[in-house]
Image (cartoon, coloured by chain):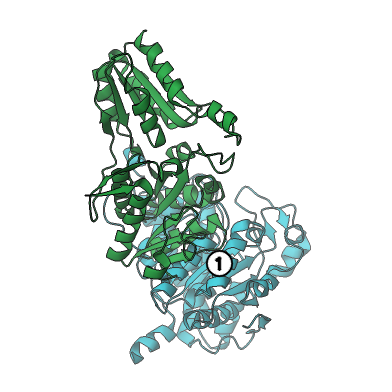
Amino acid sequence: MAVMTYLQAISSALRDELRADPRVLLMGEDIGVFGGAFKVTDGFATEFGPDRVMDTPLAESAIIGCAIGAAVVGMRPICEMQFADFISCGFDQLVNVAGRMHYRQELAVPIVVRLPSGGGFSGGPFHSQNPEALFMHSPGIKVVAPSTAADAKGLLHAAIHDPNPVCFMEHKHLYRRVKGEVPGGIYETPFTARIARPGSDLVVIAYGAMVDVALEATEDLDGASVEVLDLRSLVPLDEAAILDSVARCSKVVIVDEANMTCAAGAQVAALIAHRGFEDLDGPIVRVATPDVPIPFSPPLERAVLPGLERVREACRELLSY
Amino acid sequence: MATETARVHADGAGSGHLQPEDRVWLLREMLLMRGIEERAMSLYRQGRIPGSFYDGYGQEAVSAGAAFAMAPQDRLCILHRDLAAHLIRGVTPARILSQYMGRAAGVTRGRDGNVHFGDRALGCVGMVSMLPDMMLVATGMAMAFRLRGERRCALTWFGDGSTSRGDFHEAMNWAGVQRLPVVFVLENNQYAYSTPIDKQFAVDPVQRAAAYGFVGVTVDGNDVEAVFEATREARERAISGGGPTLIEAVTMRMHGHAAHDDMKYVPKEQVQEWRRRDPVERQERRLRDLGIDVDALREQVTAEIDAATEEALAGPMPAAEDALEGVFCTGEAEPLGDGLAPWSGFRREQGVS
C-alpha cells in the first residue's frame, strides 16, 4: 500500500475513475489548466483533455444543473465546488432538481458534488463553511465525510459508483495534514461508521476533521477508555453503529465543526435520546461551533471552532458525572 | 457567428416540411391537449383532481410544434403548459388523467402534482417549480451529446417570467460558450402569474441571444407550423454543430395561472384579440382547405378522451405505504429512453439509412 495524503487519495480516486470509466467527467472552476484551487486535479487536463476535466464558467448552479443533465443521459459527472461555501449558489439545482428526481420520476441522478469544506486556516466567513446538514435535511441526497486518506479514496469511489447524488465533504484542513496507507486500485468504502479507536467509558462521535481532534483530545484522558466513532457517512446515518457504541460506553460526546443548531450532531443526539436512552449514564453532550459565521482573525477563529481543549473539557466533565 | 435576430413567417402556406398526414397529426395532438385539459378542469371542479389545475389553453401550438420537430433520440425538458409534447412523445391520455388525479397509474405514481411529470422511458424530464431550472438540465444533456460526438439535441421550454432568473443567464451563457446542441423555447404568454411582460424585462429577451453568441428567432407561437419550422431549423443547426438557438414563441395565456385564478388583471380586449388567433382553429382551417374531415377527427379525439377518463377513474389511488419508497435509486442508474417521433421526415431519414 502506498502512503498518501488525504488530498493525494482524492486525486488518486478521480484519476482511477477517469481511466476506468469513459462516462466519468470532472466539471468545475479552474480545475483544468490550473489544476484546481487546491491542486486536486493537477496535471489531469494533460492526461484526460479539456473535455473530461472541464473548466466551466463561474456558475455553480450551472455546474450542478449541467451535471444533472449529463447524468440522466448516461454520464457520471463529478462537480467540484471550489469551496463548499459556494454550494449555496447551486443549492436549488442540487436540492430541487437532483434530490427530488428519483422519487418523482424514477430517474436516477448519478452525480458527485465535491465540497472542500471546513475552517482552521483563516478562510473567513465564505471559505470555511460546513454546509453538510443542509443536505441531510433534503431528501434524496447522500452525504459522506471522510477523515482518513484511505476512506477519502474509498468513499469517493463508492460515491462515484452510487446511482444517487452524493455530497462528498472533503475537509480542506485535512488535505495535506492527514497521511496514511491507501490501498491500490479502485475499492469502495461502505457508507457506514467506523470505530476509529475502541473504548468503554465514553464515546466521542465525530466525522471529518473532528475525528482527529477527538482522537488527540482523548488519547490520554486521566486513564479513561474513550471510544471514537467516525461516522464517515451522514446520509445514510449508521444508526446501528451509533447505538452500539452508546450501549457499550453509556456516555456520549458529539463533536461537529459545523454550527451548533440543527447540525449533524443534533440528529445523532436526537437518535440517542430516543433509542439509546436506557443505555445512557449521563446527559448527551455536544461540542460544536457556536451559531456565528466563521471569523477571519486567528484568535477569533480559534475561539469558535471546536479544539482539543473544548473536547477534552467536555469529556472530563461527562466522565465525572 | 450568426447573431442576428431572425423572424419566421409560416402563416398561410405553413411549413414546407410537413406532409398532409403530419398536419393531421399536429391538429390531433392539439385537439387532444385541449380536450384533455378541458376534461381535467371539469374533473377538478368535481373534486377529483387535488391541489390546483394548470392548463395551456391557447398555447397548444408551442408544445405541439416544437416537440414534433424532435427525433426519438433527442431529449426534452417539458414545462407545465406543454401537454402536447408529452402526447407526441407517446404518453397516453389515460396516464395523463391518472397523473392529474394523483392515481397510481399516473406518470409519477402520485408523487408529484398534475403538470410536473416526464416519462423517462420516452426521453422526457418533468419540470420543477423553480423556473427555469430545466434550462440547465437541457444544457447538460446537450453537453454530454457534444462530448460523445452524437448527432442529437436537447430542447426545453420556459416562460417569460423565467428570463428574469439567474439560471436563464447561466444556461444561455454556458450553451453559448460551449456551442451546444440545445434548443431553448421561450414561451412568451404575456404574463407570469399576474405580472405582465413590461414589468419583467426592458428588452425583448430574444435579443439577448446575440449577446450570448447564438441565434435568436421570434415566431408566431399560435401557428403550430411556424413553431415546427423554427424548431426544425434550430435542431438542424444544433446537430450540425451550429450551436444553440433561442426561439421566442409569442403567444397568450388565455386562462388564469391556475384554476383558482380569474385573471381580472388581464384587459378583456387583450383576451378578445388573442381569441381571434386561436391556434387550434387556425390549424383546423388549414386542414379544411386540404379537404380533411376535421369534424370526424374531433369526434375521434373526444371518444379517445372519454375512454381515457373512464380508465383513469377506474384506476386505484397509490397505497399509503408507497409514500416512503423510492427516495433513492437502489439499482442501476437507467438513463432516459427514446420517445416517439411521428414526423414523417424522421421516417424518411430512417428509410434512407
Q: Is residue A174 left or right of residue B45?
A: left
Image location of residue B206, percent across then percent down:
67, 72
Which quadrant is the C terminus of chain A positioned in? top left
Out of A104 and A204, give the one closest to the viewer.
Answer: A204
Image location of residue B229, percent across then percent down:
56, 82
Q: Residues within 10 Å of mark 1 (few under 14, many from 20)?
A: many
State the residue lying farthest toward the top.
A321
Instruction: Name the residue: 44% across, 30% down.
Output: A256
Q: State the SS at label 1.
A: helix
Find disc 1 in the rendering and name its residue: B174
Write down the chain letter for disc 1: B
Q: Is residue B187 depicted above or below A68 in this figure?
A: below
Q: Is residue A29 left or right of residue A320?
A: right
Instruction: Name the residue: 52% across, 62% down.
Output: B136
Q: Is residue B22 depicted above or below A135 in this figure?
A: below
Q: Colour of chain A?
A: green
Using the rendered image of the protein, determine whether residue B334 is visible from the camera's viewpoint: no
Q: Amino acid at mark 1?
A: Trp
Q: Colour of chain B?
A: cyan
Q: Is residue A162 depicted above or below B21 in this figure?
A: above
Give the quarter of the image for residue B174: bottom right
Q: Is residue A272 left or right of residue B74?
A: left
Q: Is residue B319 left or right of residue B8?
A: left
Using the rendered image of the protein, determine whether residue B11 is visible from the camera's viewpoint: yes
